[in-house]
Amino acid sequence: MKADEQHVAAAKKVLKFIKENDDFLLSAHINADGDAIASVIATGLLLKSLGKTFFMVFHDQELDQRFDYLPSIDKIIHYKENLSLPVQSAIILDVPGLKRLGDVANLLPEKNKTVKIDHHPEEDDFAAINMAFEKASSTTQLIYEIIELAGIEIDRELARAVYTGIVYDTGRFSFSNTTARDMYICGKMIDYGVEPSDITNRIFFENSFDALRTIGAGLATMESHLDGAVIVIYLDYEAMSRNHQGEIEELANYSVAIRGGKLGLFVREFKPGFHKISFRSKGNIDVNEIAKVFNGGGHTRAAGCRIEGGKDEVINKVLAEIKKRL
């Protein structure tokens, strides 16, 4: 299964940039998910194989513990004020716009020393080289194209990072973004020592006791709106504060799992009076466009935003915007 020609052409530009530069900053979006974490780690292992110096830095002060099995995760630096690193170049991953990067944006070098690799709709142009393809399943899949082009040796650690990013962002190959290329790459990673059941169980089927109870509580709040077209799941701040966000993110997918539903919302209060909304769509509704109305973004069928206000105020605002598009 060959790589997309456009992906390969972009990978050549990125690889040339890597070979000509050093002292790299690697980072991804706020509230880093499996693809963000895995793509940064995979890129770091690529750079290590090429003899480059790099710093993996995240805005987040802690990362989703489901990905602790990736050995390089303990090399990630958590941003703090006045952090000083000898950064000369940057590769920013899974980030469509600078506001998604958080405080790590303070460490960026000039634009001509910055590369962006991403699969979201572009929000702003902050890099000289853009390897950005919306139809790619994941940012990690794009990183693999560079790895393959570089011809480096793939060990089990690198294989697990590549497999993790792809399996996470394809929903264990169940989402519509899954391609034959994804299956081919992951098949090769199995040849390099990846155990699919181990990674799948760690990411999707192992929860803390509190997280699973919270998921149950969230499902109990499920409401149907707009004649059954929209399903809403809600968690208040008290419930959210007991769990790491990543462990209960599956509620977003449950919101669109109702037969006959067209769109799902997972609404949670991440601090008093402020809500985060995850949108999921299984029809023709572009939830990225809805999220943009509220200064959010994402993909056609999966997006998110943050809105200030109380529960009813926030949900009603979003439902009014959805109603226009049904």
Image (tube, rainbow, N blue to C red):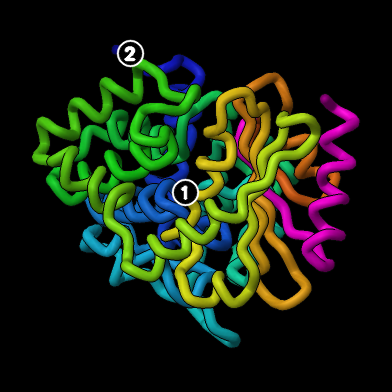
- Crowd tier of the residue under label 2, counting other residues whose Cα lies within 10 Å: few below 14, some 14–19, many 20 or above: few
Q: Position of residue 6 (x, y in %)?
A: 51, 19
Which tag, 1 or 2, sits closer to the chain's start?
2
Measured along the vertical axis of the image, is residue 47 above or below residue 142?
below
Residue visible at 62% across and 48% down?
222
Measured along the vertical axis of the image, is residue 212 above or below residue 137?
below
What amino acid is labelled 2 in the image? Lys
What amino acid is labelled 1 in the image? Glu
Circle 2 SS class: loop
Q: Nearer the viewer, residue 22 or 300?
A: 300
Q: Position of residue 63 (x, y in %)?
A: 42, 68
Circle 1 SS class: helix
Residue located beneath label 1 in the image: 250
Measured along the vertical axis of the image, is residue 2 above or below residue 235?
above
**Magenta residues, as a range?**
301-326
- Crowd tier of the residue under label 1, counting other residues whose Cα lies within 10 Å: few below 14, some 14–19, many 20 or above: some
